[in-house]
Image (spheres, rainbow, N blue to C red):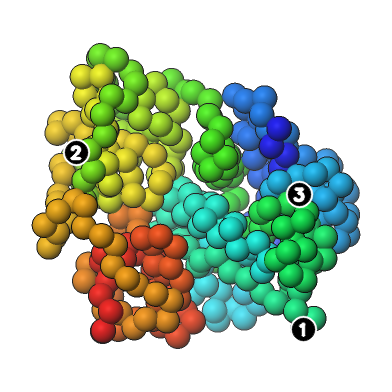
């Protein structure tokens, strides 16, 4: 049984946002309820526990983390939205941040996946949301700075101490900035909070090898044969959606036509949207592409999408370049890891973090984008 403790940060009507009626404490309490329901939906292998069951409750920071310890949880997630106090900077600050424990480095991958999933839901609507990365923060005592994370790892000051506990993933997730008009407007809509919860639950279930539930298929009407994947071929490139129907196309959790549409793009995806892909999977009489972001699968039918091979690649098996944190790099192809374009204003960027084939680049300590290492070059 996978035990997950979900902490709705703060308390009722705490941290007023840009949109009328928005409060961080209220919104994340709703999000926590939705996430609990999504995690436990379709499986008996997850027990989700809230640190507070009513809006009126306000456990201490340390008590919130201790709830995870007492329950023998594997995952602790504290839900928040971010803020900037300086009014002149409020519209300039946006994006999703995930903080992890200093002493649980193996949680980096899950943190990246969660950040990407939230961005993929929010960005098509807000137009600004991006991943600010998976971060850590150290106190003057050398322990985790944030009390909820520190207590979730039982006050650990070393990796050995943290590994001795049951909590293997301790996160604070900042779901955009409630001081930013576009992100706050998105977060103020309960329907959107449900979409975020669904995306997060899917990522967690996938990470731990659990199968999510199913929803009726809509959009593309393909796959008349068998419904299970039969063969996989590696590909390198991207696909552009050309289907112009009002119902759009689905992104599926697994390479099966009946699998859940996870709404990674705030609902069906539409003509003109671009995704990086890594595999082409034969499913019945048709095929699907696997998205590079790990978000899921989309139809490979030429009636609906056009495949574009990655420029300069002689082989789909080309090895990943040796890109390391601290490298100075040039952008070869200004496309984010999830397939969206971005403005490359500078000739060189610093690699701020690397995880597999995903690199976070920026200027100084300011994040510009997360990109595939194949789209940058060391200079």
Q: Circle 3 — which element? A: loop
Which label's residue is closer to the chain start, 3 or 2? 3
Residue 305, which numbered label?
2
Is 60 located above or below residue 260 in the figure? below
> For the residues marked 3 and 2, what is the alpha-carbon distance in whole angstroms?
45 Å
Q: Give me the C-alpha separation between circle 1 and circle 3.
A: 25 Å
Asked whether residue 8 appears in the rendered view, the answer is: no
Residue 166 circle label? 3
Residue 68: x, y in percent? 80, 49
Task: Find residue 340 and report its horizontal and vertical position in percent.
Answer: 31, 57
Assess disc 3: are there few (<14), some (14-19) or many (≥20) residues with their C-alpha within 10 Å of its C-alpha. some
| Quadrant housing residue 48 | top right
Density class for disc 1 (Cα within 10 Å; few <14, some 14-19, many ≥20) is few
Determine the residue positioned at 62% across, 74% down: 84
Percent of width and height locating residue 118 = 51, 51
Q: Residue at x 40, y 31 (%)?
A: 254
Residue at x-position 23% and y-position 43%: 234
Q: Where does label 1 land, which residue?
A: 140
Is 101 on the left-hand or right-hand side of 202? Answer: right
Tag count in the figure? 3
Identity of the residue drawn at 52% across and 56% down:
109
């Amino acid at each position: 049984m996978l035990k997950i403790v979900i902490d709705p940060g703060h308390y009722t009507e705490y941290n007023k946002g840009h949109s009328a009626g928005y409060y961080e404490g209220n919104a994340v309490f709703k999000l926590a309820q939705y996430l609990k329901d999504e995690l436990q939906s379709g499986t008996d292998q997850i027990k989700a526990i809230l640190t507070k069951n009513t809006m009126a409750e306000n456990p201490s920071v340390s008590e919130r983390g201790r709830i995870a310890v007492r329950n023998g949880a594997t995952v602790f997630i504290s839900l928040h939205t971010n803020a900037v106090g300086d009014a002149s900077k409020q519209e300039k600050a946006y994006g999703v941040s995930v903080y992890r424990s200093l002493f649980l480095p193996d949680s980096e991958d899950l943190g990246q996946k969660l950040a990407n999933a939230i961005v993929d839901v929010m960005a098509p609507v807000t137009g600004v949301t991006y991943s600010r990365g998976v971060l850590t923060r150290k106190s003057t005592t050398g322990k985790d700075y944030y009390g909820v994370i520190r207590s979730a790892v039982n006050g650990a000051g070393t990796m050995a101490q943290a590994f001795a506990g049951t909590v293997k993933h301790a996160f604070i997730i900042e779901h955009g900035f409630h001081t930013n008009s576009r992100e706050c407007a998105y977060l103020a809509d309960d329907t959107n909070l449900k979409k975020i919860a669904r995306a997060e639950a899917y990522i967690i279930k996938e990470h731990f090898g659990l199968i999510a539930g199913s929803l009726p298929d809509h959009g593309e009407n393909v796959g008349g044969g068998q419904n299970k994947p039969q063969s996989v071929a590696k590909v390198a490139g991207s696909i552009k959606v050309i289907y112009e129907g009002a119902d759009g196309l689905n992104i599926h959790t697994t390479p099966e036509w009946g699998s859940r549409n996870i709404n990674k793009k705030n609902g069906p995806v539409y003509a003109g949207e671009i995704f990086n892909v890594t595999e082409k999977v034969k499913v019945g009489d048709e095929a699907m592409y696997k998205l590079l972001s790990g978000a899921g699968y989309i139809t490979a039918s030429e009636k609906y999408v056009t495949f574009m091979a990655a420029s300069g690649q002689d082989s789909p098996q080309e090895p990943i370049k040796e890109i390391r944190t601290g490298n100075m790099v040039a952008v070869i192809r200004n496309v984010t890891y999830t397939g969206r374009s971005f403005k490359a204003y500078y000739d060189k960027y610093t690699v701020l973090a690397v995880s597999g084939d995903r690199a976070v680049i920026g200027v100084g300590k300011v994040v510009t984008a997360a990109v595939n290492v194949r789209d940058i070059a060391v200079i």
